[in-house]
Image (spheres, grey):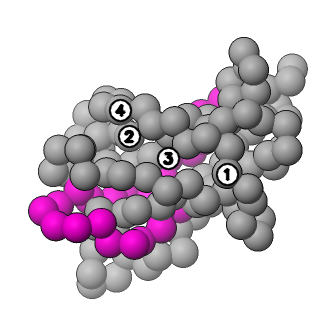
Amino acid sequence: MRQAWMGVMVLLSAVSLSAQGPPKNPSQIAFFCPDHDRDDQHEIDVVRVSDGVVIATLLGGDPPLTGTEVVVDLNVQPVAFGSYRFVVRAVAGPLRSANSDPSEVWERVPGRPSGIVVR
């Protein structure tokens, strides 16, 4: 089916989970979209780690490729403090791809956006 060409895969994190822990207050998400030239938009679910509930779906538009990745600016400030993952889908007209694998865990904590990119 056509969903195969729209598969979106969140890449493994380039941010190490060393002593500093998970990324905090990310301001971008980067992911690989194999057929980016055919989609209209990307939907980004914010998934709470504790129970797997999608608490928000962000519309990421259709930004140009940055190298081999799609990079979407986002604002996590309205999200309650806690631990989350992102899950991404590509949208082309009425079609939606399967969900990506979840991103690395990130945290919403008090403070400003960090400028960190989650993958």
Mark 2 touching mark 4, by CB under 8 A?
A: yes
Q: The residue tagged with tag 1: helix, strand or loop?
A: loop
Q: Residues within 10 Å of mark 1 (few under 14, many from 20)?
A: some
The dot on residue 56 is: 4
Q: Which mark, residue 63?
A: 1
Q: Decide: marks 2, 3 in contact (CB < 8 A)?
A: no
Instruction: Residue 43: give x, y in percent of width and height.
Output: 55, 35
Question: Residue 84 appears at what percent x and percent y?
Answer: 32, 49
- Residue 85 pos. (x, y %): 39, 48
Mark nearer the N terminus (1 vs 3): 1
Q: Is residue 6 visible?
A: yes
| Amino acid type indicated by mark 1 | Pro
For disc 3, the marked residue is 102
Give amino acid for label 4.
Answer: Ala
Location of residue 84 with respect to 2 vertically, above or below: below
Q: Residue at x 15, y 51 (%)?
A: 81
Check disc 2 and report the residue beneath it: 46
Which mark is nearer the camera, 4 or 3?
A: 4
